[in-house]
Protein backbone atom coordinates (compact mmCIF):
# COMPACT_ATOMS: atom_id res chain seq x y z
CA UNK A 1 0.00 0.00 0.00
CA UNK A 2 1.34 3.47 -0.89
CA UNK A 3 2.41 5.61 2.08
CA UNK A 4 -0.09 8.31 3.01
CA UNK A 5 1.06 11.76 1.84
CA UNK A 6 2.63 14.11 4.36
CA UNK A 7 0.57 17.19 5.25
CA UNK A 8 1.84 20.18 7.25
CA UNK A 9 -0.41 22.39 9.42
CA UNK A 10 0.26 25.43 11.61
CA UNK A 11 -1.55 26.49 14.75
CA UNK A 12 -0.38 28.06 18.00
CA UNK A 13 2.17 26.15 20.07
CA UNK A 14 0.70 26.51 23.56
CA UNK A 15 2.68 23.92 25.48
CA UNK A 16 6.32 23.24 24.63
CA UNK A 17 7.92 20.01 23.45
CA UNK A 18 8.23 17.94 20.29
CA UNK A 19 6.56 14.52 20.14
CA UNK A 20 5.82 11.78 17.67
CA UNK A 21 2.71 9.68 18.15
CA UNK A 22 -0.52 8.34 16.74
CA UNK A 23 -3.63 10.44 16.26
CA UNK A 24 -6.57 9.52 18.45
CA UNK A 25 -9.72 11.37 17.46
CA UNK A 26 -11.51 12.33 20.62
CA UNK A 27 -15.11 12.85 19.62
CA UNK A 28 -18.40 11.94 21.18
CA UNK A 29 -19.68 8.66 19.82
CA UNK A 30 -21.87 9.20 16.78
CA UNK A 31 -23.80 6.37 15.21
CA UNK A 32 -26.62 5.84 12.73
CA UNK A 33 -29.58 4.33 14.53
CA UNK A 34 -32.34 2.59 12.66
CA UNK A 35 -35.88 1.83 13.74
CA UNK A 36 -36.50 -1.94 13.87
CA UNK A 37 -39.82 -3.70 14.58
CA UNK A 38 -39.53 -6.00 17.61
CA UNK A 39 -41.83 -8.96 18.21
CA UNK A 40 -40.62 -10.12 21.62
CA UNK A 41 -41.20 -6.90 23.54
CA UNK A 42 -40.33 -8.29 26.97
CA UNK A 43 -36.97 -9.52 25.68
CA UNK A 44 -36.34 -5.97 24.39
CA UNK A 45 -37.28 -4.52 27.79
CA UNK A 46 -34.82 -6.89 29.49
CA UNK A 47 -32.13 -5.89 26.98
CA UNK A 48 -32.66 -2.22 27.89
CA UNK A 49 -32.52 -2.93 31.63
CA UNK A 50 -29.31 -4.94 31.20
CA UNK A 51 -27.75 -2.00 29.33
CA UNK A 52 -28.70 0.31 32.21
CA UNK A 53 -27.12 -2.02 34.78
CA UNK A 54 -23.92 -2.39 32.71
CA UNK A 55 -23.71 1.40 32.32
CA UNK A 56 -24.04 1.87 36.08
CA UNK A 57 -21.20 -0.54 36.77
CA UNK A 58 -18.99 1.17 34.19
CA UNK A 59 -19.68 4.66 35.60
CA UNK A 60 -18.87 3.43 39.12
CA UNK A 61 -15.55 2.02 37.90
CA UNK A 62 -14.83 5.22 35.97
CA UNK A 63 -15.59 7.24 39.08
CA UNK A 64 -12.94 5.52 41.16
CA UNK A 65 -10.39 5.84 38.33
CA UNK A 66 -11.17 9.55 38.05
CA UNK A 67 -10.84 10.10 41.80
CA UNK A 68 -7.51 8.33 41.81
CA UNK A 69 -6.20 10.30 38.85
CA UNK A 70 -7.30 13.88 39.48
CA UNK A 71 -8.62 13.95 43.04
CA UNK A 72 -11.74 12.87 44.91
CA UNK A 73 -13.47 16.21 44.40
CA UNK A 74 -13.91 15.43 40.70
CA UNK A 75 -15.76 12.11 41.15
CA UNK A 76 -19.04 13.99 41.56
CA UNK A 77 -19.22 14.51 37.79
CA UNK A 78 -19.92 10.78 37.53
CA UNK A 79 -22.32 10.82 40.48
CA UNK A 80 -24.50 13.09 38.35
CA UNK A 81 -24.38 10.52 35.53
CA UNK A 82 -25.34 7.71 37.91
CA UNK A 83 -28.31 9.73 39.15
CA UNK A 84 -29.52 10.13 35.58
CA UNK A 85 -29.29 6.39 35.01
CA UNK A 86 -31.47 5.88 38.05
CA UNK A 87 -34.12 8.37 36.95
CA UNK A 88 -37.27 6.29 37.35
CA UNK A 89 -39.62 8.53 35.38
CA UNK A 90 -37.29 8.57 32.37
CA UNK A 91 -36.74 4.82 32.44
CA UNK A 92 -40.42 4.00 32.82
CA UNK A 93 -41.25 6.33 29.92
CA UNK A 94 -38.70 4.53 27.72
CA UNK A 95 -40.00 1.09 28.74
CA UNK A 96 -43.56 2.20 28.04
CA UNK A 97 -42.56 3.51 24.63
CA UNK A 98 -40.80 0.24 23.77
CA UNK A 99 -43.97 -1.66 24.69
CA UNK A 100 -46.34 0.69 22.86
CA UNK A 101 -44.36 1.21 19.69
CA UNK A 102 -42.81 -2.28 19.33
CA UNK A 103 -39.62 -0.42 18.43
CA UNK A 104 -36.04 -1.37 19.33
CA UNK A 105 -34.61 0.11 22.56
CA UNK A 106 -31.90 2.07 20.66
CA UNK A 107 -34.50 3.93 18.64
CA UNK A 108 -36.75 4.72 21.60
CA UNK A 109 -33.78 5.88 23.68
CA UNK A 110 -32.50 8.10 20.87
CA UNK A 111 -35.89 9.78 20.55
CA UNK A 112 -36.17 10.35 24.29
CA UNK A 113 -32.61 11.71 24.39
CA UNK A 114 -33.22 14.11 21.49
CA UNK A 115 -36.32 15.48 23.17
CA UNK A 116 -34.58 15.93 26.52
CA UNK A 117 -31.52 17.54 24.94
CA UNK A 118 -33.72 19.98 23.04
CA UNK A 119 -35.68 20.79 26.17
CA UNK A 120 -32.45 21.47 28.12
CA UNK A 121 -30.93 23.51 25.31
CA UNK A 122 -33.92 25.85 25.31
CA UNK A 123 -33.64 26.61 29.05
CA UNK A 124 -32.86 30.17 30.15
CA UNK A 125 -30.55 29.15 32.94
CA UNK A 126 -27.08 28.54 31.56
CA UNK A 127 -26.19 25.99 34.22
CA UNK A 128 -29.11 23.72 33.36
CA UNK A 129 -28.73 24.39 29.65
CA UNK A 130 -25.17 23.11 29.80
CA UNK A 131 -26.37 19.86 31.38
CA UNK A 132 -27.51 18.62 27.95
CA UNK A 133 -24.00 17.29 27.38
CA UNK A 134 -24.34 15.11 30.52
CA UNK A 135 -27.54 13.61 29.07
CA UNK A 136 -25.76 12.89 25.77
CA UNK A 137 -22.86 11.31 27.63
CA UNK A 138 -25.16 9.02 29.63
CA UNK A 139 -27.29 8.10 26.60
CA UNK A 140 -24.15 7.37 24.61
CA UNK A 141 -23.00 4.93 27.24
CA UNK A 142 -26.38 3.10 27.22
CA UNK A 143 -26.29 2.95 23.41
CA UNK A 144 -22.83 1.40 23.54
CA UNK A 145 -24.05 -1.25 25.93
CA UNK A 146 -27.14 -1.94 23.84
CA UNK A 147 -25.10 -2.35 20.69
CA UNK A 148 -22.81 -4.82 22.37
CA UNK A 149 -19.83 -2.68 21.35
CA UNK A 150 -17.18 -2.47 23.98
CA UNK A 151 -17.17 0.96 25.60
CA UNK A 152 -14.16 2.95 24.54
CA UNK A 153 -11.24 1.55 26.43
CA UNK A 154 -7.67 2.76 26.70
CA UNK A 155 -6.55 -0.70 27.72
CA UNK A 156 -5.22 -1.84 24.34
CA UNK A 157 -3.91 1.51 23.15
CA UNK A 158 -0.18 2.07 22.87
CA UNK A 159 1.47 4.74 25.02
CA UNK A 160 1.99 7.26 22.20
CA UNK A 161 -1.48 8.70 21.66
CA UNK A 162 -1.89 12.29 20.50
CA UNK A 163 -5.42 13.45 21.18
CA UNK A 164 -7.00 15.32 18.28
CA UNK A 165 -10.27 17.10 18.90
CA UNK A 166 -12.34 20.17 18.14
CA UNK A 167 -12.54 21.09 21.81
CA UNK A 168 -11.17 19.57 25.00
CA UNK A 169 -12.43 20.90 28.29
CA UNK A 170 -10.48 20.76 31.58
CA UNK A 171 -12.83 17.98 32.79
CA UNK A 172 -11.99 15.84 29.73
CA UNK A 173 -8.54 15.24 31.25
CA UNK A 174 -10.31 12.99 33.74
CA UNK A 175 -11.58 10.66 31.03
CA UNK A 176 -8.23 9.89 29.43
CA UNK A 177 -5.41 7.60 30.44
CA UNK A 178 -2.85 10.37 30.90
CA UNK A 179 0.32 8.22 30.89
CA UNK A 180 -0.66 7.09 27.38
CA UNK A 181 -1.13 10.61 26.06
CA UNK A 182 1.85 12.32 24.42
CA UNK A 183 0.21 15.47 23.17
CA UNK A 184 -2.91 17.38 22.28
CA UNK A 185 -4.00 19.04 19.02
CA UNK A 186 -7.15 21.18 19.09
CA UNK A 187 -9.09 23.10 16.49
CA UNK A 188 -10.15 25.65 19.12
CA UNK A 189 -8.48 27.38 22.08
CA UNK A 190 -5.62 29.79 22.69
CA UNK A 191 -2.52 30.05 24.83
CA UNK A 192 -4.32 31.27 27.94
CA UNK A 193 -7.31 28.91 27.76
CA UNK A 194 -7.47 26.68 30.83
CA UNK A 195 -6.86 23.55 28.81
CA UNK A 196 -3.57 25.06 27.57
CA UNK A 197 -2.63 26.09 31.10
CA UNK A 198 -3.21 22.51 32.32
CA UNK A 199 -1.16 21.08 29.41
CA UNK A 200 1.79 23.24 30.40
CA UNK A 201 1.35 22.08 34.00
CA UNK A 202 1.47 18.46 32.84
CA UNK A 203 4.40 19.07 30.44
CA UNK A 204 2.12 17.82 27.67
CA UNK A 205 3.06 19.35 24.29
CA UNK A 206 0.00 20.99 22.69
CA UNK A 207 -1.01 22.96 19.61
CA UNK A 208 -4.34 24.79 19.37
CA UNK A 209 -6.26 26.83 16.81
CA UNK A 210 -5.79 24.42 13.85
CA UNK A 211 -8.86 25.14 11.79
CA UNK A 212 -10.45 22.24 9.81
CA UNK A 213 -7.77 19.88 11.06
CA UNK A 214 -10.13 17.02 11.92
CA UNK A 215 -11.17 16.51 8.31
CA UNK A 216 -7.51 15.89 7.34
CA UNK A 217 -6.59 13.32 9.94
CA UNK A 218 -7.76 9.80 10.84
CA UNK A 219 -7.30 7.88 14.08
CA UNK A 220 -4.02 5.97 13.79
CA UNK A 221 -2.29 8.48 11.49
CA UNK A 222 1.24 9.30 12.57
CA UNK A 223 1.59 12.85 13.91
CA UNK A 224 4.69 14.93 14.56
CA UNK A 225 3.65 17.67 16.96
CA UNK A 226 5.81 20.66 17.76
CA UNK A 227 4.41 22.55 20.73
CA UNK A 228 7.19 25.15 20.41
CA UNK A 229 6.35 26.53 17.00
CA UNK A 230 2.79 25.22 16.51
CA UNK A 231 3.62 22.92 13.60
CA UNK A 232 1.73 19.62 13.25
CA UNK A 233 2.71 17.18 10.51
CA UNK A 234 0.31 14.41 9.56
CA UNK A 235 2.05 11.26 8.26
CA UNK A 236 5.58 12.74 8.27
CA UNK A 237 8.03 11.10 5.85
CA UNK A 238 10.68 8.75 7.36
CA UNK A 239 13.36 11.32 6.46
CA UNK A 240 11.50 14.01 8.41
CA UNK A 241 11.09 11.76 11.46
CA UNK A 242 14.77 10.90 11.41
CA UNK A 243 15.80 14.57 11.19
CA UNK A 244 13.62 15.47 14.18
CA UNK A 245 14.98 12.50 16.18
CA UNK A 246 18.51 13.65 15.60
CA UNK A 247 17.65 17.22 16.58
CA UNK A 248 16.00 16.06 19.80
CA UNK A 249 18.95 13.86 20.69
CA UNK A 250 21.34 16.75 20.11
CA UNK A 251 19.46 19.42 22.07
CA UNK A 252 17.15 17.53 24.42
CA UNK A 253 13.41 18.04 24.34
CA UNK A 254 13.16 20.28 27.40
CA UNK A 255 14.94 23.34 28.74
CA UNK A 256 18.18 22.64 30.57
CA UNK A 257 17.35 23.15 34.21
CA UNK A 258 14.51 21.09 35.55
CA UNK A 259 16.37 20.34 38.73
CA UNK A 260 14.12 20.88 41.72
CA UNK A 261 14.84 23.38 44.47
CA UNK A 262 13.89 22.96 48.09
CA UNK A 263 10.26 23.70 48.90
CA UNK A 264 9.82 27.43 49.53
CA UNK A 265 13.33 28.58 48.58
CA UNK A 266 13.33 32.16 47.32
CA UNK A 267 14.92 32.77 43.91
CA UNK A 268 17.90 35.11 43.86
CA UNK A 269 19.01 37.56 41.20
CA UNK A 270 22.71 37.74 40.32
CA UNK A 271 23.25 40.40 42.98
CA UNK A 272 21.31 38.47 45.61
CA UNK A 273 17.89 40.18 45.56
CA UNK A 274 15.22 37.70 46.75
CA UNK A 275 12.30 37.09 44.39
CA UNK A 276 9.27 35.11 45.53
CA UNK A 277 8.12 32.43 43.08
CA UNK A 278 4.76 30.89 43.87
CA UNK A 279 2.67 28.32 41.94
CA UNK A 280 -0.67 28.71 40.17
CA UNK A 281 -2.80 25.58 40.66
CA UNK A 282 -6.26 24.34 39.80
CA UNK A 283 -6.31 20.87 41.29
CA UNK A 284 -4.97 19.24 44.43
CA UNK A 285 -2.81 16.77 42.58
CA UNK A 286 -0.62 19.69 41.40
CA UNK A 287 0.50 20.36 44.97
CA UNK A 288 3.34 17.87 44.87
CA UNK A 289 4.66 19.46 41.67
CA UNK A 290 4.45 22.87 43.36
CA UNK A 291 6.45 21.61 46.33
CA UNK A 292 9.00 19.69 44.25
CA UNK A 293 9.61 22.73 42.07
CA UNK A 294 10.37 24.81 45.15
CA UNK A 295 7.29 27.09 45.10
CA UNK A 296 7.13 29.54 47.99
CA UNK A 297 3.39 28.89 48.36
CA UNK A 298 0.38 29.00 46.06
CA UNK A 299 -0.01 32.39 44.40
CA UNK A 300 -3.35 31.57 42.82
CA UNK A 301 -5.69 28.65 43.51
CA UNK A 302 -8.37 28.76 40.81
CA UNK A 303 -11.27 27.59 42.99
CA UNK A 304 -13.74 27.44 40.08
CA UNK A 305 -12.39 23.99 39.25
CA UNK A 306 -14.22 22.70 42.36
CA UNK A 307 -17.49 23.95 40.94
CA UNK A 308 -16.94 22.50 37.50
CA UNK A 309 -19.63 19.93 36.63
CA UNK A 310 -20.91 19.88 40.21
CA UNK A 311 -24.45 18.44 40.27
CA UNK A 312 -25.72 21.16 42.64
CA UNK A 313 -23.91 23.99 40.88
CA UNK A 314 -21.62 24.61 43.84
CA UNK A 315 -19.85 22.41 46.40
CA UNK A 316 -21.13 22.47 49.98
CA UNK A 317 -19.12 24.10 52.77
CA UNK A 318 -17.70 20.81 54.12
CA UNK A 319 -16.59 19.70 50.67
CA UNK A 320 -14.75 22.99 50.05
CA UNK A 321 -13.30 22.99 53.56
CA UNK A 322 -11.70 19.58 52.96
CA UNK A 323 -9.93 20.92 49.85
CA UNK A 324 -8.82 24.25 51.37
CA UNK A 325 -7.62 22.46 54.50
CA UNK A 326 -5.42 20.17 52.43
CA UNK A 327 -4.02 23.15 50.56
CA UNK A 328 -3.26 24.98 53.81
CA UNK A 329 -1.70 21.95 55.50
CA UNK A 330 0.39 20.73 52.57
CA UNK A 331 1.80 24.15 51.73
CA UNK A 332 2.40 25.15 55.35
CA UNK A 333 4.39 27.26 56.38
CA UNK A 334 3.96 29.01 53.02
CA UNK A 335 0.80 30.90 52.07
CA UNK A 336 -2.02 29.80 49.79
CA UNK A 337 -4.04 32.44 47.92
CA UNK A 338 -7.52 31.10 47.25
CA UNK A 339 -9.26 33.03 44.54
CA UNK A 340 -13.01 33.08 45.09
CA UNK A 341 -15.15 31.58 42.34
CA UNK A 342 -14.17 33.10 39.00
CA UNK A 343 -16.93 31.49 36.97
CA UNK A 344 -17.71 32.79 33.55
CA UNK A 345 -16.15 32.99 30.13
CA UNK A 346 -14.78 29.59 29.09
CA UNK A 347 -14.22 28.21 32.57
CA UNK A 348 -17.38 27.04 34.29
CA UNK A 349 -20.59 26.43 32.40
CA UNK A 350 -22.46 28.15 35.16
CA UNK A 351 -23.95 27.96 38.59
CA UNK A 352 -27.63 27.92 39.46
CA UNK A 353 -27.67 31.71 39.36
CA UNK A 354 -25.56 32.12 36.30
CA UNK A 355 -28.13 33.37 33.83
CA UNK A 356 -27.94 33.18 30.06
CA UNK A 357 -25.44 35.67 28.71
CA UNK A 358 -24.53 36.74 25.21
CA UNK A 359 -20.96 37.70 26.07
CA UNK A 360 -19.88 35.83 29.19
CA UNK A 361 -16.34 37.31 29.47
CA UNK A 362 -17.90 40.71 30.03
CA UNK A 363 -20.96 39.47 31.86
CA UNK A 364 -21.93 38.25 35.27
CA UNK A 365 -18.60 36.68 36.16
CA UNK A 366 -15.98 36.75 38.93
CA UNK A 367 -16.86 39.01 41.86
CA UNK A 368 -20.03 40.15 40.05
CA UNK A 369 -21.43 36.64 40.18
CA UNK A 370 -20.37 36.18 43.81
CA UNK A 371 -22.16 39.36 44.88
CA UNK A 372 -25.22 38.29 42.91
CA UNK A 373 -25.30 34.68 44.16
CA UNK A 374 -24.42 35.65 47.74
CA UNK A 375 -25.32 32.36 49.38
CA UNK A 376 -22.68 30.53 47.37
CA UNK A 377 -20.14 33.30 48.16
CA UNK A 378 -20.88 33.12 51.91
CA UNK A 379 -20.41 29.35 51.87
CA UNK A 380 -17.07 29.70 50.10
CA UNK A 381 -15.81 32.39 52.48
CA UNK A 382 -16.87 30.31 55.49
CA UNK A 383 -14.91 27.32 54.20
CA UNK A 384 -11.88 29.57 53.65
CA UNK A 385 -12.01 31.00 57.19
CA UNK A 386 -12.41 27.56 58.73
CA UNK A 387 -9.39 26.33 56.76
CA UNK A 388 -7.37 29.30 58.04
CA UNK A 389 -6.95 27.38 61.31
CA UNK A 390 -4.75 24.90 59.42
CA UNK A 391 -2.23 27.15 57.67
CA UNK A 392 -1.66 30.51 56.00
CA UNK A 393 -4.56 31.42 53.76
CA UNK A 394 -5.25 34.50 51.68
CA UNK A 395 -8.41 35.46 49.78
CA UNK A 396 -8.28 36.99 46.30
CA UNK A 397 -11.33 38.59 44.66
CA UNK A 398 -11.47 38.19 40.85
CA UNK A 399 -12.55 40.68 38.18
CA UNK A 400 -12.70 43.75 40.44
CA UNK A 401 -13.71 46.82 38.43
CA UNK A 402 -15.19 49.16 41.07
CA UNK A 403 -14.43 50.11 44.68
CA UNK A 404 -18.03 49.25 45.62
CA UNK A 405 -17.40 45.61 44.78
CA UNK A 406 -14.59 45.51 47.34
CA UNK A 407 -16.71 47.32 49.94
CA UNK A 408 -19.63 44.94 49.45
CA UNK A 409 -17.40 41.88 49.52
CA UNK A 410 -15.71 43.12 52.72
CA UNK A 411 -19.05 43.51 54.50
CA UNK A 412 -19.91 39.89 53.67
CA UNK A 413 -16.41 38.68 54.58
CA UNK A 414 -16.60 40.46 57.96
CA UNK A 415 -19.97 38.85 58.68
CA UNK A 416 -18.57 35.40 57.96
CA UNK A 417 -15.41 36.07 59.98
CA UNK A 418 -17.51 36.94 63.07
CA UNK A 419 -19.70 33.86 62.60
CA UNK A 420 -16.70 31.54 62.26
CA UNK A 421 -14.91 33.19 65.20
CA UNK A 422 -17.91 32.42 67.39
CA UNK A 423 -17.70 28.74 66.58
CA UNK A 424 -13.94 28.09 66.32
CA UNK A 425 -12.70 30.75 68.73
CA UNK A 426 -9.12 32.09 68.68
CA UNK A 427 -7.89 29.34 66.31
CA UNK A 428 -9.18 31.47 63.43
CA UNK A 429 -6.27 33.24 61.74
CA UNK A 430 -5.93 36.59 60.00
CA UNK A 431 -6.76 36.10 56.33
CA UNK A 432 -5.23 38.85 54.14
CA UNK A 433 -7.49 40.10 51.34
CA UNK A 434 -6.29 40.74 47.80
CA UNK A 435 -7.84 42.01 44.59
CA UNK A 436 -7.17 40.71 41.09
CA UNK A 437 -6.13 43.58 38.85
CA UNK A 438 -7.21 42.33 35.45
CA UNK A 439 -9.64 44.92 34.12
CA UNK A 440 -8.44 48.29 32.73
CA UNK A 441 -10.78 50.16 35.11
CA UNK A 442 -8.95 48.60 38.06
CA UNK A 443 -5.58 49.72 36.70
CA UNK A 444 -6.67 53.31 36.43
CA UNK A 445 -8.26 53.41 39.89
CA UNK A 446 -5.47 51.38 41.44
CA UNK A 447 -4.62 53.84 44.23
CA UNK A 448 -8.19 53.84 45.49
CA UNK A 449 -8.61 50.06 45.24
CA UNK A 450 -5.21 49.22 46.69
CA UNK A 451 -5.95 51.12 49.90
CA UNK A 452 -8.88 48.76 50.57
CA UNK A 453 -6.92 45.51 50.32
CA UNK A 454 -3.78 43.92 51.76
CA UNK A 455 -2.22 42.94 48.45
CA UNK A 456 -2.71 42.96 44.68
CA UNK A 457 -2.62 40.13 42.14
CA UNK A 458 -2.19 41.12 38.52
CA UNK A 459 -4.08 38.77 36.18
CA UNK A 460 -2.32 39.53 32.95
CA UNK A 461 -4.23 36.90 30.94
CA UNK A 462 -7.43 38.85 31.37
CA UNK A 463 -5.75 42.24 31.53
CA UNK A 464 -4.27 41.73 28.05
CA UNK A 465 -7.62 40.41 26.80
CA UNK A 466 -9.55 43.46 28.04
CA UNK A 467 -6.84 46.04 27.38
CA UNK A 468 -6.43 44.96 23.75
CA UNK A 469 -10.06 43.81 23.25
CA UNK A 470 -8.87 40.35 22.14
CA UNK A 471 -10.74 37.23 23.25
CA UNK A 472 -8.03 35.11 24.91
CA UNK A 473 -9.54 31.86 23.63
CA UNK A 474 -10.30 32.80 20.02
CA UNK A 475 -7.68 31.44 17.59
CA UNK A 476 -8.85 33.85 14.87
CA UNK A 477 -7.56 36.83 16.84
CA UNK A 478 -4.70 35.06 18.62
CA UNK A 479 -2.22 37.13 16.56
CA UNK A 480 -3.54 40.26 18.33
CA UNK A 481 -3.00 38.84 21.84
CA UNK A 482 0.36 40.57 22.28
CA UNK A 483 1.86 40.50 25.76
CA UNK A 484 4.61 42.87 24.53
CA UNK A 485 2.18 45.48 23.21
CA UNK A 486 3.57 48.83 24.51
CA UNK A 487 0.20 49.61 26.14
CA UNK A 488 0.44 46.42 28.19
CA UNK A 489 4.00 47.32 29.23
CA UNK A 490 2.99 50.83 30.34
CA UNK A 491 0.05 49.41 32.21
CA UNK A 492 2.27 46.99 34.15
CA UNK A 493 4.86 49.69 34.82
CA UNK A 494 2.09 51.91 36.22
CA UNK A 495 0.91 49.10 38.51
CA UNK A 496 4.45 48.50 39.81
CA UNK A 497 4.96 52.23 40.52
CA UNK A 498 1.61 52.71 42.31
CA UNK A 499 2.10 49.57 44.40
CA UNK A 500 5.60 50.68 45.38
CA UNK A 501 4.36 54.18 46.27
CA UNK A 502 1.73 52.68 48.58
CA UNK A 503 4.07 49.96 49.85
CA UNK A 504 1.46 47.39 48.79
CA UNK A 505 2.62 43.85 47.94
CA UNK A 506 1.86 42.97 44.33
CA UNK A 507 2.15 39.65 42.52
CA UNK A 508 1.98 38.87 38.81
CA UNK A 509 -0.22 35.79 38.30
CA UNK A 510 -0.76 35.60 34.53
CA UNK A 511 1.04 33.27 32.14
CA UNK A 512 3.69 35.88 31.26
CA UNK A 513 5.41 35.23 34.62
CA UNK A 514 6.58 31.88 33.32
CA UNK A 515 8.31 33.35 30.28
CA UNK A 516 12.01 33.98 31.03
CA UNK A 517 12.24 37.10 28.82
CA UNK A 518 9.10 38.58 30.34
CA UNK A 519 10.21 37.70 33.86
CA UNK A 520 13.33 39.86 33.32
CA UNK A 521 11.12 42.73 32.17
CA UNK A 522 8.86 42.37 35.21
CA UNK A 523 11.88 42.29 37.51
CA UNK A 524 13.13 45.50 35.92
CA UNK A 525 9.77 47.20 36.47
CA UNK A 526 10.05 46.37 40.16
CA UNK A 527 7.92 43.23 40.55
CA UNK A 528 9.50 40.88 43.07
CA UNK A 529 6.65 38.35 43.37
CA UNK A 530 5.69 36.08 40.49
CA UNK A 531 3.23 33.18 40.38
CA UNK A 532 3.22 30.67 37.55
CA UNK A 533 2.57 27.08 36.58
CA UNK A 534 4.71 25.00 38.98
CA UNK A 535 6.88 23.36 36.32
CA UNK A 536 8.13 26.73 35.06
CA UNK A 537 9.55 27.69 38.44
CA UNK A 538 12.96 25.95 38.06
CA UNK A 539 13.62 27.62 34.70
CA UNK A 540 12.65 31.09 35.95
CA UNK A 541 14.73 30.56 39.08
CA UNK A 542 17.75 29.69 36.96
CA UNK A 543 17.29 32.63 34.58
CA UNK A 544 16.93 35.16 37.41
CA UNK A 545 20.24 33.95 38.84
CA UNK A 546 21.95 35.31 35.72
CA UNK A 547 20.38 38.79 35.91
CA UNK A 548 21.69 41.69 38.01
CA UNK A 549 18.74 43.76 39.20
CA UNK A 550 20.25 47.05 37.91
CA UNK A 551 20.60 45.58 34.45
CA UNK A 552 16.97 44.45 34.49
CA UNK A 553 15.94 48.02 35.37
CA UNK A 554 17.82 49.39 32.38
CA UNK A 555 16.21 46.76 30.17
CA UNK A 556 12.71 47.68 31.36
CA UNK A 557 13.37 51.41 30.93
CA UNK A 558 14.55 50.91 27.38
CA UNK A 559 11.69 48.48 26.53
CA UNK A 560 9.20 51.16 27.58
CA UNK A 561 10.52 53.56 24.94
CA UNK A 562 9.41 51.50 21.92
CA UNK A 563 6.14 52.03 20.07
CA UNK A 564 5.56 48.55 18.60
CA UNK A 565 5.50 45.07 20.11
CA UNK A 566 7.94 43.97 17.39
CA UNK A 567 10.58 46.50 18.49
CA UNK A 568 10.18 45.47 22.14
CA UNK A 569 10.44 41.82 21.12
CA UNK A 570 13.65 42.28 19.13
CA UNK A 571 15.29 44.34 21.82
CA UNK A 572 14.24 42.14 24.74
CA UNK A 573 15.11 38.78 23.20
CA UNK A 574 18.53 40.02 22.04
CA UNK A 575 19.54 41.63 25.28
CA UNK A 576 18.38 38.75 27.51
CA UNK A 577 19.95 36.13 25.21
CA UNK A 578 23.33 37.82 25.84
CA UNK A 579 22.90 37.55 29.62
CA UNK A 580 21.74 33.93 29.79
CA UNK A 581 24.31 31.37 28.64
CA UNK A 582 21.92 28.82 27.10
CA UNK A 583 19.36 28.71 24.32
CA UNK A 584 16.02 30.31 25.22
CA UNK A 585 14.71 30.55 21.66
CA UNK A 586 11.69 28.31 22.31
CA UNK A 587 10.51 30.85 24.92
CA UNK A 588 11.00 33.73 22.50
CA UNK A 589 8.33 32.20 20.26
CA UNK A 590 5.77 32.36 23.08
CA UNK A 591 5.88 36.15 23.15
CA UNK A 592 6.70 36.85 19.48
CA UNK A 593 4.22 39.20 17.82
CA UNK A 594 2.66 37.54 14.78
CA UNK A 595 2.50 39.29 11.45
CA UNK A 596 -1.15 39.47 10.66
CA UNK A 597 -4.31 37.40 10.39
CA UNK A 598 -3.39 33.75 10.88
CA UNK A 599 0.21 34.75 11.46
CA UNK A 600 2.62 32.45 9.73
C1 LIG B 1 -5.37 36.05 34.69
O1 LIG B 1 -6.42 36.50 34.21
O2 LIG B 1 -4.25 36.40 34.33
C2 LIG B 1 -5.41 35.06 35.77
C3 LIG B 1 -4.34 34.78 36.48
O3 LIG B 1 -6.55 34.39 36.00
P1 LIG B 1 -7.26 33.37 34.98
O4 LIG B 1 -6.24 32.96 33.95
O5 LIG B 1 -7.76 32.25 35.80
O6 LIG B 1 -8.37 34.20 34.40
MG1 LIG C 1 -8.32 36.23 35.15
Image (tube, rainbow, N blue to C red):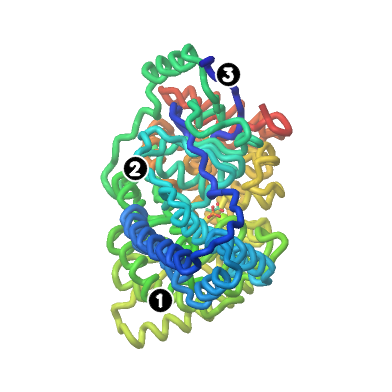
List the residue tagged with mark 3: 5
Considering only vertical position in the picture, is 574 above or below 429?
above
Q: Quadrant of the C terminus?
A: top right
Q: Can residue 163 be seen in this view?
A: yes
Badge 3 crowding class, 10 Å Cα cut-off, few under 14, some 14 to 19, many 20 or more, is few
Q: Choose the circle earlier in sequence order: 3 or 2.
A: 3
Front residue of this view, candidates 262 and 274: 262
Front residue of this view, candidates 213 and 438: 213
List the residue tagged with mark 2: 155
Q: Where is residue 221 in the image (x, y as percent from the top left)?
A: 50, 28
Residue 558, quarter of the rendered image = top right
Q: Where is residue 579 in the image (x, y as percent from the top left)?
A: 45, 25
Q: Quadrant of ligand 2?
A: bottom right
Q: Where is residue 155 in the image (x, y as percent from the top left)?
A: 34, 42
Report the residue at 43% width, 14% height from top: 242
Front residue of this view, candidates 320 and 76: 76
Considering only vertical position in the picture, is 35 above or below 555?
below
Front tag of 1 and 3: 3
List the residue tagged with mark 1: 317
Front residue of this view, candidates 368 and 438: 368
Which residue appears farthest toward the top when viewing the image?
239
Badge 1 crowding class, 10 Å Cα cut-off, few under 14, some 14 to 19, many 20 or more, is some
Amino acid sequence: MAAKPEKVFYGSGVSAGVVLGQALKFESHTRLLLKVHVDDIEAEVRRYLRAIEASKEQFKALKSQLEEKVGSEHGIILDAHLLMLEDRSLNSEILENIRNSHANAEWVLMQATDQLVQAYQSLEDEYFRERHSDIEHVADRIQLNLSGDRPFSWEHLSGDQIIVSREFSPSDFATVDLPKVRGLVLESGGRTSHTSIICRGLLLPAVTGLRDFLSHVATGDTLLLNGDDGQVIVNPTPARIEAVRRRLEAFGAYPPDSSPAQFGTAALTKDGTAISLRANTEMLHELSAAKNCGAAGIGLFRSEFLYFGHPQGYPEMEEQLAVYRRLAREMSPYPVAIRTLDAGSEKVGGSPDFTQQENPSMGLRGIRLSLYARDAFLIQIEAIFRASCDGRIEIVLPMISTIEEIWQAKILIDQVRSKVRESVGPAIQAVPLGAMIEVPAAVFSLEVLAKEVDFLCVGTNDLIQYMLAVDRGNPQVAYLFQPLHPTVLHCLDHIAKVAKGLNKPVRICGEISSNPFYAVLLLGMGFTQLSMNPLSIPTIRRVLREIPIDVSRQIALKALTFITAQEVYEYLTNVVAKLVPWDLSSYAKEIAPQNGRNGK
